[in-house]
Image (tube, helix red, strand yellow):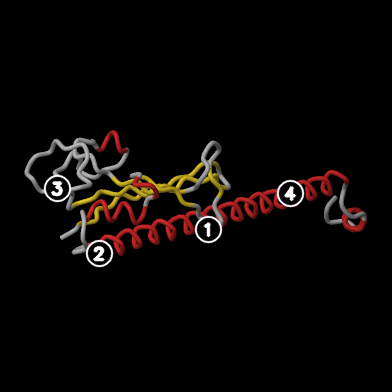
Amino acid sequence: MPGTAFGRTARVRRARRGFTLIEVAFAITVLLVALMSLSAASLSMHSLRRQNRERAVAQNAVRTVAENVHSVARKEIGQPGSWAQNVVGSLCPHGMLQASFDVPGLNPQDGDAHVGTMTFVADETATDASLGVQLGMPRDLDGDGIVGSTNVLATGRILPVVVRIRWQGVRGNAQIVHPLFVNGY
């Protein structure tokens, strides 16, 4: 009897009783799910922020190394001796074709002693597949018209360089590879 005084009284009594235990449990469950979602999103954003920071540090290091290589290559033009040997000798210890370096803020991958490597390619017969980058190799590096020398340090006028930075990041192993050319013209 919804229109009677008895029906109105029953509705008023039910409204004054408050929430049932099921309603409270449901509300708490909804709040917990919302809090857990917010917490997971916050952790994910923090991880992405750290990953972006690592990548920016690595990219800045690659740019710095590339600029240093270009600077040394330009400085060695016109110097006595072979241009390519002078460039490699200035940047790599003991006449090696590779030098390692560290980047502050980045940790080397397991098994690596350093984060970065700078590798000069003096072999005209090396291929892109063997180098792991797209440089257009094999290529005539000394300008003699023949792609066959395995060491052009004494006569080379173009020097391919591969800069690699490999680090143990917040989301596992990461790497940036930057191939470039310097020339002695």
- Say which mark, if any, is on residue 142: 3
Q: Distance between the residues labelled 1 and 4?
A: 35 Å
Give residue 147's position: percent from left, percent from top: 12, 38
Give residue 165's position: percent from left, percent from top: 44, 48
Mark 2 or mark 1: name the one nearer the start of the chain: 1
Mark 2 or mark 3: name the one nearer the start of the chain: 2
Q: Distance between the residues labelled 2 and 1?
A: 32 Å
Q: Nearer the viewer, mark 4 or mark 2?
A: 2
- Say which mark, if any, is on residue 74: 2
Which secondary structure lies at badge 4? helix
Instruction: Check contact, mark 1 vs mark 4: CB within 8 A.
Output: no
Above or below 134: residue 129: above
Instruction: Identify the residue position indicated by label 1 in the image.
Output: 53
Which secondary structure lies at badge 3? loop
Mark 4 or mark 3: name the one nearer the start of the chain: 4
Give residue 185's position: percent from left, percent from top: 15, 60
Neighbourhood count class around disc 4 (C-alpha, 10 Å): few under 14, some 14–19, many 20 upward: few
Q: In which quarter of the image is residue 49?
A: bottom right
- Say which mark, if any, is on residue 30: 4
Instruction: Check contact, mark 2 vs mark 3: CB within 8 A.
Output: no
Mark 1 or mark 3: name the one nearer the start of the chain: 1
Q: Distance between the residues labelled 2 and 3?
A: 17 Å
Question: In the image, what residue type sits under mark 3?
Answer: Asp
Mark 4 or mark 2: name the one nearer the start of the chain: 4
* Residue drawn at x 21%, y 63% as measured from the top left: 77
Question: In the image, what residue type sits under mark 1?
Answer: Arg
Q: State the residue in front, 40 or 57.
A: 57
Mark 1 or mark 4: name the one nearer the start of the chain: 4
Q: Please state if 124 lies on the left or on the right of 33 as rendered.
A: left
Neighbourhood count class around disc 3 (C-alpha, 10 Å): few under 14, some 14–19, many 20 upward: many
* Residue drawn at x 24%, y 53% as measured from the top left: 181
